[in-house]
Image: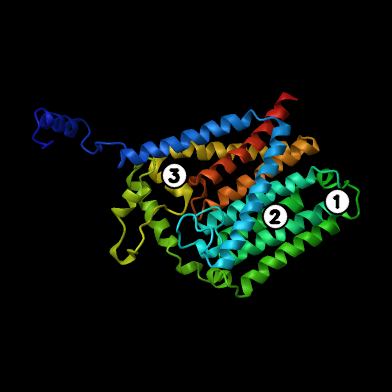
Amino acid sequence: MIAIAPGQSIALAVRSLVAPHAKATISLDHLATTFAALQIAVFSIACFLLHRVRYRQRKALYALFAAMGAVSVIVSTTQYVSGGAVFDFYHSGHAPHAPGLFANRNHGALFLGCCLTFAGALISLQRLSAELKLGLFAALAAPALALIALSGSRAGLVISGMMALGVIMFMPRPAWGLSHSSRCAMPLRGLAAIGIVSFLAFVAFVPLSGDTASRLTMIDSDLRWSIWQRSIVLAGQYIPWGSGLGTFPAAYALIEPVNELQPFYVNHAHNDWIEAIVEAGVFALIPLAAGVVLVSQGLWANRLLDPIRRLECRTGLIVTSGLLAHSLVDYPLRTPTLALTFAFALTLVSSAIRTLRQN
């Protein structure tokens, strides 16, 4: 009916004459793009508001994330023990695998790793001995990493383990109560690091109920490889403007091979970097480049800051790196809680850079 409407034939003729290969719309799904734009707006507002938060308020946010991590541990433990019968908030198939406050165990595992990092920063700010600080952090890390291992989240376990290792090895020595000349500095850190690495190795080789060990050996048969390959092709088809924010499921369904059809549909590329380019085209390179520049500036700036600011900067860098690394194999930044966690981590880095410039 639209095709035979008055004036439509003229519009089609003009379009074919001026731009024969142009698409009629900038989005495959206008409603999905609207919702995605609203999510980005919320993230942007959160970044702006968090950037105005002062040091004492940021310290309170450390405590808030640590408390949320404790709640997540309790919820995850209950889910695991009950086989998903209790605290099944989303009626998800992941409920027996201890996803905590999330529907997806990978996101729950990563959030625990982020909360553990903020808890480590909070502990390092207390007036306690170095031995007690490291002991408290180890006491928090043990149940958190154990739950992540039992959940079966491969990327969550590896990245959270690396984040915990980063807290121990890369936090400023004065924050842990260690002077540069302290003889116990390296032995204490080394002992804690060996404990984390040994635990990760144990999980990798010993079968647990979360089946993490076997899942680590089945990486080559993961469906993600095929999704990534086809998503890269999809990105090339929609260059330069992209298929539209939030439209990846609709775009991928058009090229999904019949022999890979599953009872569930492919909702994301399981790689936020690729999916961003599919949906936003060349415009996706702007925030990606900005993020790389910010992290690079943070790495440069943290050497010149005082211990407290350096602690903030390195905490932000550890959490930011963990979230960006996890984005290579999943879609953590498309969940509101992890997106706000990312915003807070970026704020810590940018605030440190701003302080250095002011000084």
Residue that label 3 marks: 276
Residue that label 1 marks: 130
Q: Whole-percent x and y of residue 188?
A: 84, 57
Label 3 element class: helix
Which label is found at residue 210? Answer: none
- Alpha carbon distance from label 3 to label 1: 43 Å
Q: Whole-percent x and y of residue 40?
A: 47, 36
Q: Residue at x 54, y 43 (%)?
A: 339
- Alpha carbon distance from label 2 to label 3: 28 Å
Of residues 156 and 84, the one drawn nearer to the viewer in this rendering: 84
* Residue depth check, mark 2 versus mark 3: number of the one nearer the observer: 2
Give the image quarter of residue 247.
top left
Going by the numbered disc 2, the residue's amino acid type is: Ala
* Residue depth check, mark 3 versus mark 1: number of the one nearer the observer: 1
Give the image quarter of residue 24.
top left
Going by the numbered disc 3, the residue's amino acid type is: Ala
- Which numbered disc flags the more N-terminal residue, 2 or 3? 2
283 shown above or below 177? above
Going by the numbered disc 1, the residue's amino acid type is: Ala
259 displayed left or right of 162 = left
- Which numbered disc flags the more N-terminal residue, 3 or 1? 1
Of residues 140 and 344, the one drawn nearer to the viewer in this rendering: 140
Label 1 element class: helix
Residue that label 2 marks: 164
- Alpha carbon distance from label 1 to label 2: 16 Å
